[in-house]
Image (spheres, rainbow, N blue to C red):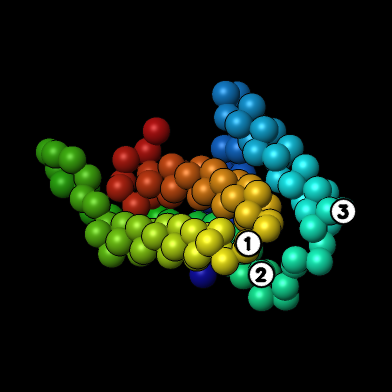
Amino acid sequence: MNNLWSEFVALLKWGITFLWGEWFVYVTIALLLNLVISVVWTTTHRSDLWRPRYTVIFLPLLAFPLIALIGAIAWSTGVPVPPLGRPNLNVAASWCVVVLNILAIAVSLLMIFKMKGIRWLSLSVFLFIQWMLQGIDLIVAMPIGGVWL
């Protein structure tokens, strides 16, 4: 269990480090600025349109640690490597990550559709969450696939 926790923390740290990588930092800064500006604009000009149910827009953020947990489980269980050939893919973990990504996209797109008048905010949150998920997907693909960069 201790090994699983350390692998989970390592994957989370690497996933966050992806956002501040050499070439990725520019996209991260642009998305963060877009998010901050949309939040400030929405709270000052359109605060009357916010509904408590709109907090569901942040639900896809839970996919980030869940994907890291799937990667840590795949890492701790290990995929047997054939003597001469490519490593085996952990198919169950791969499908779990795909399903979480599809659910995150579906919830975000639904909230963009529902949040009339403040769609800029919901689109900004969607883009930033998808950028975070792309980073963790890249990192988690290594323990799931058994091929380390």
Residue 138 or 102: which is nearer the viewer?
A: 102
Residue 54, numbered circle:
2
Residue that numbered label 3 is attached to: 44
> What's under tag 2, amino acid-wise?
Tyr
User: Where is residue 2 shown, x and y percent of the image?
Assistant: 55, 65
- Labels 3 and 1: the sequence-earlier one: 3
Instruction: Tell me if label 2 and label 3 are in contact, CB under 8 Å.
Output: no
Residue 100 in view in this figure = no
Q: Secondary structure at mark 3?
A: helix
Image quadrant where residue 58 sits: bottom right
The local crowd at label 2, few if under 14, some if 14 to 19, many if 20 or more residues have their Cα within 10 Å, is some
- Labels 2 and 3: the sequence-earlier one: 3
Residue 20 or 32: which is nearer the viewer?
A: 32
Residue that numbered label 1 is attached to: 116
> What's under tag 3, amino acid-wise?
Thr
Tag nearer the camera, 3 or 1:
1
User: Where is residue 114 shown, x and y percent of the image?
Assistant: 57, 66
Q: Is residue 120 left or right of residue 33?
A: left
> Distance of mark 2 from mark 1, alpha carbons?
11 Å
Residue 7, numbered circle:
none
Instruction: Tell me if label 3 and label 1 are in contact, CB under 8 Å.
Output: no
Q: Secondary structure at mark 1?
A: loop
Residue 114 or 70: which is nearer the viewer?
A: 114
> Distance of mark 3 from mark 1, alpha carbons?
16 Å
Residue found 35% across the figure and 58% down from its top? 98
User: Where is residue 36 shown, x and y percent of the image?
Assistant: 77, 45
Residue found 27% across the figure and 57% down from its top? 90
- Labels 2 and 1: the sequence-earlier one: 2
Above or below residue 23? Residue 146 is below
Image quadrant where residue 148 sits: top left
> Distance of mark 2 from mark 3, alpha carbons?
17 Å
The local crowd at label 1, few if under 14, some if 14 to 19, many if 20 or more residues have their Cα within 10 Å, is few
